[in-house]
Amino acid sequence: MKRIAVIGTGNMGAPMAQNLAAAGYDVRAFDIVREKMTLLAAHGITACSGHAEAMEDADLVLTMLPTAVEVNDVFDRHTVSHAPEGCLVMDSSTIDLEDARSLHGRAGDSGFGMLDAPVSGGTGGAAAGTLTFMVGGETAALDSARDVLNAMGSRIIHCGGAGMGQAAKMCNNLMLGIQMASVVEGFHLARRVGLDDAKLYEVAYSSSGNCFSLTAFCPVPDVVPASPANRDYEPGFSTDLMLKDMEIALNAAELSGLPLEMAPLAAALYRRFSEAGYGGLDFSAIFRMLEGSGQ
């Protein structure tokens, strides 16, 4: 593979495109928000005027878009018309499992290979090229894209067939969202009874309370230097995105007839915070809401 079309150059798509260009790929990018493409040329990326120009002669079309609405629109209105037959389509957005499965079917019908390959690692991992890719699709398709994935990530996990990358992502983020709710309540309880934030962190970090929500997104300031709490909750992963991912998981559970107990409670916290106008803050900022300053 030599030429890659990147559709969606936001907080995740732009650094992913930059790492592909740094690895020697001919990267041609497009985003409907033109301002998001202004810095790409400095990284050797061609900022295109539209989908057709970006996809012309592409070996791989990579989409990194906000929701399934945009993913389906790009595929149905642009990829089918402009990407060359035999091109590999790889979607790294986070979308509903059924949408991912449908996309695989439509891609096959149109003569394209297809991978659903959502990511974990956030904007920091995207910039550093250390993302984890959770991949769903045929082994042959993954093998053909492995070098491309290695240019953007440090771990590539083949989770199974069509849609299984999205299945892994939704289950992982379901756990992350619940973890954050527990971490937030732990710190609130610690403060109420007089335990210092740093001391709770020290104990939890080296004990059974340790988790990614604690170490990477510690919701209290002045404990973990890289935590969004130290930047007034400027997002590494926004509340609205967490809510979207939680709702994807809840929808999948409902469709499969599985009752969930903790996930609806955690999702309700993120929904309340978002509806109060704070959806753009990091998901760890529910700490502020629960202590009263975010209401």
Image (cartoon, rainbow, N blue to C red):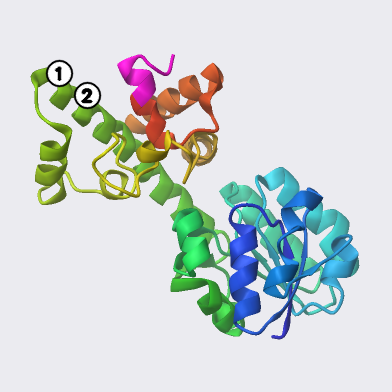
Crowdedness near tag 2: few (<14), some (14–19) or many (≥20) residues, C-alpha within 10 Å: some
Question: Magenta segment, which residues?
Answer: 288-295
Amino acid type, callout 1? Arg
Q: Position of residue 108 (x, y in %)?
A: 74, 69
Where disc 2 sits, the SS reads helix
Q: Which residue is mark 2?
A: 188
Task: Please say if 170 is above or below 49.
Answer: above
Does residue 238 appear anywhere in the picture?
yes
Q: Nearer the viewer, residue 51 or 47?
A: 47
Residue drawn at point x = 52 percent, y = 62 percent: 126
| Lateral position of residue 71 relative to residue 266, left or right | right
**Residue 141, quarter of the rendered image:** bottom right
Task: Please say if 147 is above or below 83.
Answer: below
Contact between labelled residues 1 and 2, with CB atoms less than 8 Å apart: yes
Where disc 1 sits, the SS reads helix
In 3D space, how far apart are the residues under numbered discs 2 and 1 (Cα atoms)?
Answer: 6 Å
Residue drawn at point x = 11 percent, y = 51 percent: 206
Q: Is residue 51 magenta-colored?
A: no
Quadrant of the rendering where the C terminus is positioned = top left
Task: Please say if 30 is above or below 61.
Answer: above
| Lateral position of residue 31 relative to residue 161, left or right | right
Quadrant of the rendering where the N terminus is positioned = bottom right
Q: Which residue is mark 1?
A: 192
Q: Position of residue 214 (x, y in %)?
A: 26, 44
Amino acid type, callout 2? His
Q: Position of residue 212 (x, y in %)?
A: 30, 50
| Lateral position of residue 119 relative to residue 174, left or right | right
Q: Position of residue 46 (x, y in %)?
A: 79, 71
